Amino acid sequence: MAVEAEPVGKESGPCPVIDALEQLGSQWRLVVLHDLRGGEKRFNELKRSTDASARTLSRVLDDLQELGFVHRRMEPDAPVATFYSLTEKGESLGPVLAEIEGWAEEWLEACDE
């Protein structure tokens, strides 16, 4: 006789760490969030500093904006300038990213740069 699994709901769902990691998600999201810790940047500045393709960066910035981590500001001057910065929610990740970075420096081999 097979035992049916209970449906996963909010109360018995995955732990908050898994939920957080799902929002932070991909390597590119983390790279962009880390890069924006230094302050507001234009799209092309982010493209150069992250080494992401325009398509990838655009998709990641849209995702991060939709999740509330990144704010987009446009200046209508010719040529149109688009700036990205961290929201309060994005800024609140600063200490978390710093802790992860410290842990990685202690426990993981250095990344190939």
Image: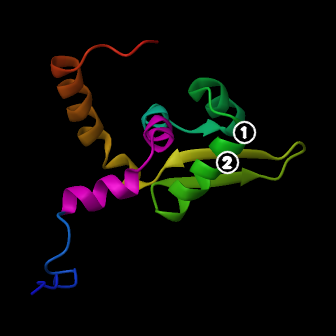
Instruction: Give the amino acid type for the residue marked by disc 1 in the picture.
Output: Ala
Residue drawn at x 59%, y 50% as measured from the top left? 61
Q: Identify the image quadrant of residue 45.
A: top right
Q: Which mark is residue 54?
A: 1
Residue 24 falls inside the magenta stretch: yes
Relative depth, front residue between 111 and 92: 111
Q: Is residue 87 above or below residue 56?
A: below
Q: Which mark is residue 58?
A: 2
Q: How is the image coloured?
A: rainbow
Residue drawn at x 88%, y 42% as measured from the top left? 79
Residue drawn at x 26%, y 15% as measured from the top left? 109
Left or right, 59 with respect to 20, comes to right
Q: Identify the image quadrant of residue 52.
A: top right
Q: Is residue 102 above or below residue 111?
A: below
Instruction: Give the amino acid type for the residue marked by disc 2 in the picture.
Output: Ser
Relative depth, front residue between 81 and 69: 69
Residue drawn at x 9%, y 87% as measured from the top left? 1
Give the mark count. Answer: 2
Q: Residues within 10 Å of mark 2 (few under 14, many from 20)?
A: some
Boundaries of the magenta span: 16-33
Q: Secondary structure at mark 2?
A: helix
Q: Secondary structure at mark 1?
A: helix
Relative depth, front residue between 85 and 65: 65
For this orientation, the residue located farthest to the front is 1
